[in-house]
Amino acid sequence: MDVVPRSPPTSGPRGRTATNRPPQSPSSRRPQTRGTQTRGTATRGTVRPAGVRSGPVDRWWTTVTVLVLMVASEYKLRLRADDQAIAGSADPFILWEIACYAAVAAFLVRRFGLSVRPTRVRPVVFAAFAFVAVLVVSAAGSPYLSLALVRAAQLVVVLALSRVIARQGTRAGLHRLGHGFAALVAASVAFGVAVPFPRLPLQQDRFSWLYVHPVVAGEYVGIATVLLTGYLASRSVGRPGPRLGWPAYAGLLVVCAGGLIATRTRGAIAGAVVGVLLVLWSLRQGRRRLDLAAVVIGVVSVAALVGASAVQSFLTRGESAAQLASLNSRTTLWTAALHAFAENPLYGYGLGASRGLFLATIGLGGGHNALINVLVDAGLAGALCWLALLTTLVVAVVRVPYAAGGVTVDRALMLGVIGFLLTDSVFTEGLGAAANVASTWLFVIVGWTDLLLNRAAGVRPAPGR
């Protein structure tokens, strides 16, 4: 081994060499906090807990993975008949969707390992595993096996992502997701205005973008409206993650709320109203809640007196009395679905079965109601697990402030999105199905809630790779 000779010490201004510095007392030494190393990552100012990294991938993986799944599942570049979708025939866009889910699964395995074992088996986590397990098992008996197996695999990927969020995620990462989702939806609305795509005959007066169904578009803009209302109303409340000025939040909110109204999707509009009210209620305490209630009552009263006819005309969308009485044929579909459920009540017909069971007789695919969709696909077993998941999730979110401090904004946003999803689920099946924006947000909130409870219990993030 070569030895490099030492260079002679250089003289200082008073003849003192670099090796003859006077010793410093312990009290005069500055604490070395800058550049502290933890697991190979340099931090500044504070020591980062073990298992937490701070590179760009670590800051943005939550946002990118969740948005990739949503866009791959529902941002459609072509029209496809329902009978083609349930037949299991794969075109390039279906293969692209499957590839996106596979890429997210591969990233989770490569970055965080294979384990999705719960850090603590809380009721909400157990219910999530049980619901997914029932749907995955039911896929084997579905009359549309190819579709069911793909949806089952996608559901497993979303559950794994939820568990990784709980074990490896951060509050800042989840708020980046909220901002990224709102930015994606606002950009989608702007694209839909600038580049209108052809619409089906029954959707001519309803807004959307690409070939996304107006009901699905309503879910996106409705959730974004709830999130942006929460961020705008909580600008002075402490939280991690990105922060924008009030003009940026207000501008994004106007775009998304305008897109919501233009979709003319009644379930999404009702869900957004419920979600916004829950967000504002959760961000307030004491008398401020009474002030909010007074303002809401006043606004509703004025709207009822001044614009009742305009609101009624907007919501009826020119439909006949018979269409309105049947909720646009939903009551006919629900009656047929309940008859089908009565014939196979315990385990249902299999994941995805509701997409095709009623096409021949009614011409509608899906249950158009989340609970009915679960009853048809997975029977009582699936419905009980689904209801248990929703119940335990709401209880867990409500309990979060008592277990963890400084999470007022997180709790308000989660309650608002849950309120939207539950209200919207009366008219659409997304919350009780797989691979869509509603079910993905449901499992994201499960992971978000478990993350907060883990941190409150002192459970640190598990070491990644």
Image (cartoon, rainbow, N blue to C red):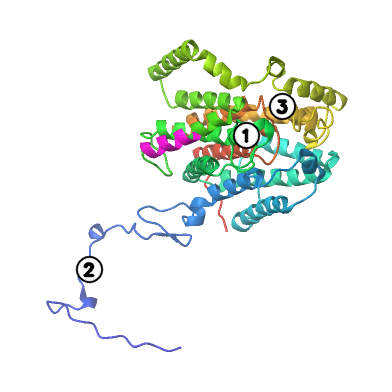
Magenta residues (range): 246-256
Q: Position of residue 379 (x, y in %)?
A: 80, 29
Image vertical order of residue 208 relative to residue 146, above or below = above
Q: Gap between marks 3 and 2, in whole Å? A: 75 Å
The residue carrying mark 1 is: 214
Q: Gap between marks 3 and 1, in whole Å? A: 21 Å
Dividing the picture into quadrants, the one containing residue 209 is top right
In-image side of 317 versus 55 (left or right): right
Using the rendered image of the protein, determine whether residue 51 is visible from the camera's viewpoint: no
Q: Position of residue 400 (x, y in %)?
A: 51, 31
Residue shown at 54% from the left, 35% from the top: 221
Dot 3 and dot 1 residues touching (CB under 8 Å)? no
Q: Is residue 249 magenta?
A: yes
The three-letter code of the residue at mark 3 reads Leu
Q: Nearer the viewer, residue 3 or 265?
A: 265
- Mark 2 or mark 1: whose residue is earlier in sequence: 2
Q: Position of residue 346 (x, y in %)?
A: 83, 28
Per the image, label 2 sits on a secondary structure element best described as loop
The three-letter code of the residue at mark 2 reads Pro
Residue shown at 54% from the left, 27% from the top: 272
Image vertical order of residue 205 relative to residue 2, above or below = above
The residue carrying mark 3 is: 371
Location of the C terminus by quadrant is bottom right
> What label does residue 421 carry, if any?
none
Using the rendered image of the protein, determine whether residue 194 is visible from the camera's viewpoint: yes
Per the image, label 1 sits on a secondary structure element best described as helix
> What label does residue 23 carry, if any?
2
Single out the mark in the foreground, 3 or 1. Answer: 1
Q: Position of residue 316 (x, y in %)?
A: 62, 20
Dot 2 and dot 1 residues touching (CB under 8 Å)? no
